[in-house]
Image (cartoon, rainbow, N blue to C red):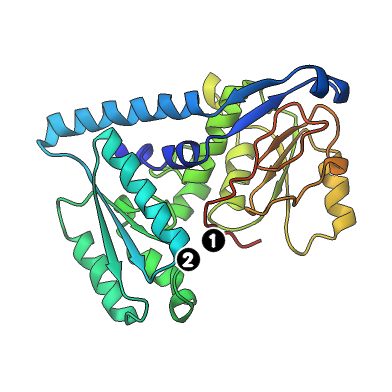
Amino acid sequence: MFHFSIKHIFKFTLTPSRFLVTHSVRAVHRQNNILHGKPIAERILNRCKNECEQFNEQYHRRPKLVAILVGGNESSKLYVRNKQRIAEHVGIAFQAINHLMHIAPSNLIDTINRLNNDGTVDGIIVQLPLPLHLVDKTENFIDAIRSDKDVDGHTTSNYNSYRHTSIPPITIPVVAVVREILLEINEPLQGKDVVIIGRSKYVGTPLALMLSQSMTDSKSSLISGATVTICHRDTHLNNLTWYCKNADIVISAVGRAKMVQHRMIKEGAVVIDVEVKRVARWITPVPGDMPSSEST
């Protein structure tokens, strides 16, 4: 059960998002209504704790998450340590497997297969990015993870289920984070124009699928039914500016600071993960210390 929420918590707790609330340009200067992401993170942490307790009662052990780290990338090492801290906080047993940078691809596959066959391991993460000699095989390593242990939701089978199922078995973490943000804002998306900057299979595309699908239950209807436009590295800057300027919601899914400038956002728009602080009603700053494997 914990697969559904274990990864939701990381982005909130590592870099607590905040939303600047305002109704006009001048209002930014005279009021400073900040809604921090920490209360959202705490709710998710409590939910994870409850799920872990239920798991322990049913299986008489703690759920176990294993992260595979290859090489000595300092950002990746920090991210894995933070995952361990959060996992242990909610009651998840955590193990980090550190491989040397020059590990052979077959040996990395062997590690993944061993974890797949270990009945005490419930979740597996291959920490990205991988070293240069393994980068072109990234999808092979990801797809080697058993789909029900793929807590990142990055395997091809989980990605395909995300495309064809309104309630996928594994929730992609970044998608879950955006979902929580939009639920917190509590404004229905039906009929609104959303621009997503970034088209990767791990972030941009699944976000577009979530926000554009038709949902009937009241909670999910808040985050579905939008008209979604995906922009990417091949989108001309003038066109990107036009799309953003006419959007009700802009989501930057490229992990790049200052990708969207304030002049590109209309007053009253909702902006997520960009540093625009003049005209938007709700914004979240770009996390500055988290590694990104996003490709636009």
The residue at the point 77 percent across, 21 percent down is 22
Residue tagged 1: 293
Residue occupied by mark 2: 129
In the visual, does 29 lie left or right of 287? right
| Picture layout, residue 204 above or below residue 116 | above
Closer to the camera in the image, 229 or 203: 203
| Badge 1 density bin: few <14, some 14–19, many ≥20, Cα 10 Å | some
Disc 2 to disc 1, C-alpha distance: 6 Å
Q: Residue at 49% of width from left, 28% of height from top?
A: 38
- Label 2's element? loop
Amino acid on which the number 2 mark rests in the picture: Pro
Seen in the picture, residue 285 relative to 156 is either above or below; the reply is above
Q: Position of residue 183 (x, y in %)?
A: 57, 25
Residue 4: quarter of image: top left
Count numbered badges in the picture: 2
User: Is the residue 11 above or below the residue 74 in the image?
Assistant: above
